[in-house]
Image (spheres, coloured by chain):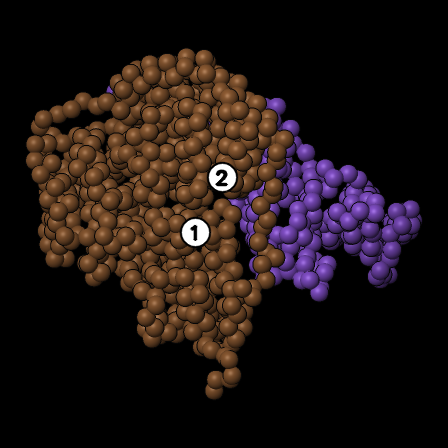
């Protein structure tokens, strides 16, 4: 019997989500989460998207979160439901994406007894979440969910998980409002170090060869950070490059843009990083894909690191000036102080620096050999870019060569338009992410640039796309290979192509037809434009099977263990061969 | 196009590319105030094992029952860079309230408690008792053939006592690991 003011745990979950402003949940029901699904059924405020695999629910939530700046929410059941969410949680942790996973658990009195569909969910997900909770008392359920949202979205964002045993969902308890939750657990952001800020501006004013290197933290910090970054670049006329996750924070059409940096970054971006004397790292973390060989990374520069997470500072690269705080706050203070001091830069030296950069640009590191017989994957992406750019467009990718080509050949003018798995490199990310993006932006053109191998990893989501009439465009660069694996085997393993091709690919057009959606196959360059237009104009989901050159390699490339100024631009020579030290690196 | 690589994998790791001067390792005693909640120790330990940090000693117990706070004392060894990483990573955890590096903060009192079971006859037995007296170890249990000693002190003192007891019939030791607090009237 219900007591006054008490509601069931399942009702508390739904009520707390509504109070948090959640409008969409991605999930998959099962025994241990049935009471919550029962409540979900009896309300209209939260829309539930039934995925076909829990991993896809987490990636869809990531796509939703990244394209909106909101927090993605996932429901999974106990045991396999929870374990299937582990890849998505880890992906979100690596790329700082805020998602809240609510998992069902066997009833408290059965925990530890190897019950049906029992798994130690908090134990398994401890290292792949910012924090997780097992809620054993219905009275604490509402507060825990509010805390979960606070932790997921606060500071450096990331995934959290709340494990709710079935008896806790059935039992009654009081609801706690968000405003009544004890917030002493929230980590306080330290005040900006003003002395350090002035020292940084001293260096900025004198810099002869400056560069701004921005990352996903700018996008996570929000529009104000993006605005401040653009103001800083416009005001100083410094060149800017960005990580894979930072694309869009500075517009690709902007005059100071050097393209992406890192392993498959442009020549001008990497040479500028190597040769600079002042590096302003904004919301990025000196990942190994970015730095190349650590002891040869940007040897002569004064390095400034703006990051909200103190553990990112001096982790891989020792920096001269850490500025800890939210990117938006730090950049605002930096801009303000720099203006107060007269908005000075070392104009004369800066012009000379731009001259060198413009010479590097002439190398045209993204050029490739074109072909009139076979579709070059780079060409396919270039045409896709050209034909889709006028649209209100969102792009996700899978992981591999196609991902790098998309990053190289597509230009993003705004943040939150480009969703890709960077840190974890999760094949199978893109398709479910495109579903999450399309749910958040029903009227927009959502394209998943894929390789056929990655795409097959979560192809079951065709069901989700069809069920919710999501017109997601699956643009598959089909080389019948694991392209990036093949490339590494060619460069590093004596051209022994161990298990890097698939002998049993489906007919993608027939696969589309089996789901009642459109399939398009294109194998000749002269038909590519028309086929892409057909894809864009078709009002439903499309699988675009783009048969491309099978042995194309992705260049430029900084081989493992090499420095930024040791890039391979295409043709191989002896001196850019990979050393034994490099060969052990991933 | 081939890169003329030797077959097989090098034994060299990526870390060998680092500046050797950064590799000066030292022991640090960290005092960590955490919420006493289920799984908190696993979180802290998981951080150390997951990121490849060392644990030389570990103690944990609740120290503030009203506030549900525990103090974890960890002795770890690493380069200054690694120790800074450890502290930053610990500080990131939700149930962690404070991380104090006692090694950097100044002088700290560090103590360990150990229990020794020494079995022997005749002179050995007498000698073990005499040494226990020198070390101010207490006899907490005794039979006609054995003594069980309790000893509190620095880890070095306990090591020294253990070494002396070996030829006198040391059978078993239990040690608590280090607990430590800063000296002086400041809390932390």
Which is nearer the eye, B8 or B23?
B23
Q: Which residue is mark 2?
A: A327
Q: Is residue A32 left or right of residue A536?
A: right
Mark 1: give few (<14), some (14-19) or many (20+) Cα within 10 Å. many
Quadrant that contains the C terminus of chain A? top left
Q: Is residue A57 left or right of residue B64?
A: left
Q: Is residue B98 above or below residue A363?
A: below
Please report the residue visible at 12 percent of the width from the left and 41 percent of the height from the top.
A533
Q: Is residue A480 visible?
A: no
The residue sitting at the bottom extreme is A1
Q: Report the Cα–Cα distance between label 1 and label 2.
A: 17 Å
B42, above or below B77, in the image: below
Secondary structure of the residue carrying tag 1 is loop
Which chain comes out brown in the rendered image? Answer: A
Query: Which lettered chain is shown in purple?
Result: B
Question: Callout 1: residue from which chain?
Answer: A
Could you tell me which chain the residue with mark 2 belongs to? A
Where is residue A246? Give x, y as percent.
Answer: 39, 37
Query: Would residue B124 be seen by someone viewing this image from the given angle?
Result: yes
Read off the residue under disc 1: A98
Residue B23 at what x, y percent from top left? 61, 28
Q: Which residue is more in the foreground, A323 or B121? A: A323
Q: Nearer the viewer, residue A397 or A553?
A: A397
Q: Earlier in the sequence, mark 1 or mark 2?
A: 1
Q: Picture coordinates of residue B18 (x, y %)?
A: 53, 25
Query: How many numbered markers are drawn?
Result: 2
Identify the mark at residue A385; answer none if there is no mark: none
Residue lying at 48% horizontally and 84% vertically, measured from the top left: A2
Under tag 2, what secondary structure? Answer: helix
- Direction from residue B130 to residue B164 in the image, left or right: left
Q: Residues within 10 Å of mark 2 (few under 14, many from 20)?
A: many
Identify the image quadrant of residue A402: top left
């Amino acid at each position: 019997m219900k007591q006054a003011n008490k509601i069931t745990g399942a009702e508390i979950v739904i009520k707390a989500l509504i109070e948090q402003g959640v409008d969409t949940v991605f999930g998959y029901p099962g025994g241990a989460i049935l009471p919550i699904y029962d409540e979900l059924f009896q309300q209209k405020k939260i829309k539930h998207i039934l995925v076909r695999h829990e991993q896809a629910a987490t990636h869809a939530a990531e796509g939703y979160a990244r394209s909106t700046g909101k927090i993605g929410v996932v429901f999974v059941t106990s045991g396999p439901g929870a374990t299937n969410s582990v890849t998505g949680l880890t992906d979100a942790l690596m790329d700082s994406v805020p998602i809240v996973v609510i998992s069902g658990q066997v009833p408290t009195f059965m925990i530890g007894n190897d019950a049906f569909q029992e798994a130690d969910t908090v134990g398994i997900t401890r290292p792949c979440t910012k924090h997780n909770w097992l809620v054993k008392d219905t009275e604490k359920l509402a507060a825990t969910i509010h805390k979960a949202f606070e932790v997921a979205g606060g500071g450096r964002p990331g995934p959290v998980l709340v494990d709710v045993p079935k008896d806790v969902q059935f039992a009654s308890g009081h609801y706690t409002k968000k405003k009544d939750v004890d917030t002493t657990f929230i980590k306080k952001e330290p005040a900006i170090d003003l002395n350090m800020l002035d020292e940084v501006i001293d260096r900025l004013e004198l810099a002869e060869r400056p560069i701004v290197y921005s990352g996903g933290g700018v996008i996570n910090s929000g529009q104000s950070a993006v605005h401040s970054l653009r103001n800083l670049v416009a005001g100083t006329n410094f060149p800017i490059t960005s990580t894979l996750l930072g694309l869009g924070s500075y517009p690709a059409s902007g005059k100071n843009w050097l393209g992406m940096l890192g392993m498959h970054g442009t020549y001008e971006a990497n040479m500028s990083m190597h040769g600079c004397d002042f590096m302003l790292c904004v919301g990025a973390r000196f990942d190994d894909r970015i730095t190349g060989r650590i002891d040869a990374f940007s040897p002569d520069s004064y390095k400034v690191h703006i990051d909200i997470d103190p553990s990112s500072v001096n982790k891989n690269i020792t920096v001269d000036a850490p500025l800890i705080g939210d990117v938006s706050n730090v950049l605002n203070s930096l801009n303000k102080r720099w203006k107060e001091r007269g908005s000075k830069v070392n104009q004369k030296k800066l012009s000379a620096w731009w001259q060198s950069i413009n010479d590097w640009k002439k190398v045209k590191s993204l050029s490739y050999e074109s072909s009139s017989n076979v579709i070059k994957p780079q060409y396919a992406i270039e045409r896709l870019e050209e034909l889709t750019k006028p649209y209100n467009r969102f792009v996700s990718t899978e992981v591999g060569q196609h991902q790098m080509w998309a990053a190289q050949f597509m230009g993003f003018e705004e943040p939150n338009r480009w969703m890709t798995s960077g840190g974890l490199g999760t094949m199978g990310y893109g398709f479910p992410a495109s579903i999450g993006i399309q749910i958040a932006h029903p009227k927009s053109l959502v394209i998943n640039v894929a390789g056929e191998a990655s795409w097959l990893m979560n192809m079951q989501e065709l069901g989700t796309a069809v069920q919710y009439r999501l017109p997601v465009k699956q643009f598959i660069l089909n080389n019948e290979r694991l392209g990036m694996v093949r490339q590494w085997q060619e460069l590093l393993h004596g051209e022994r192509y161990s298990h890097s091709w698939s002998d049993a690919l489906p007919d993608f057009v027939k696969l589309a037809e089996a789901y009642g959606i459109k399939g398009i196959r294109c194998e000749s360059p002269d038909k590519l434009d028309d086929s892409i237009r057909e894809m864009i104009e078709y009002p439903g989901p499309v699988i675009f099977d783009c048969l491309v050159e099978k042995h194309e390699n992705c260049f430029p490339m900084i081989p493992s263990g090499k420095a930024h100024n040791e890039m391979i631009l295409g043709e191989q020579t002896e001196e850019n061969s990979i050393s034994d030290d490099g060969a052990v690196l991933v | 196009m081939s890169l003329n690589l030797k077959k097989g994998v090098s034994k060299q790791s990526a870390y060998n590319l680092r500046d050797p001067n950064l590799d000066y390792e030292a022991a640090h005693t960290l005092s960590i105030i955490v919420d006493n909640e289920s799984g908190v120790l696993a979180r802290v330990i998981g951080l150390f094992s997951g990121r490849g940090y060392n644990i030389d000693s570990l103690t944990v117990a609740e120290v503030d029952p009203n506030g549900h706070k525990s103090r974890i004392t960890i002795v770890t060894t690493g380069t200054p860079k690694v120790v800074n990483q450890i502290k930053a990573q610990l500080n990131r955890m939700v149930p962690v309230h404070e991380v104090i590096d006692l090694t950097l903060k100044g002088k700290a009192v560090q103590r360990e408690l150990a229990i020794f079971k020494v079995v022997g006859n005749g002179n050995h037995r007498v000698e073990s008792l005499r040494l226990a007296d020198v070390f101010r170890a207490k006899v907490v249990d005794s039979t006609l053939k054995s003594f069980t000693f309790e000893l509190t002190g620095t880890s070095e003192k306990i090591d020294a006592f253990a070494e002396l007891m070996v030829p006198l019939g040391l059978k078993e030791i239990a040690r608590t690991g280090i607990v430590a607090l800063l000296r002086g009237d400041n809390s932390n």
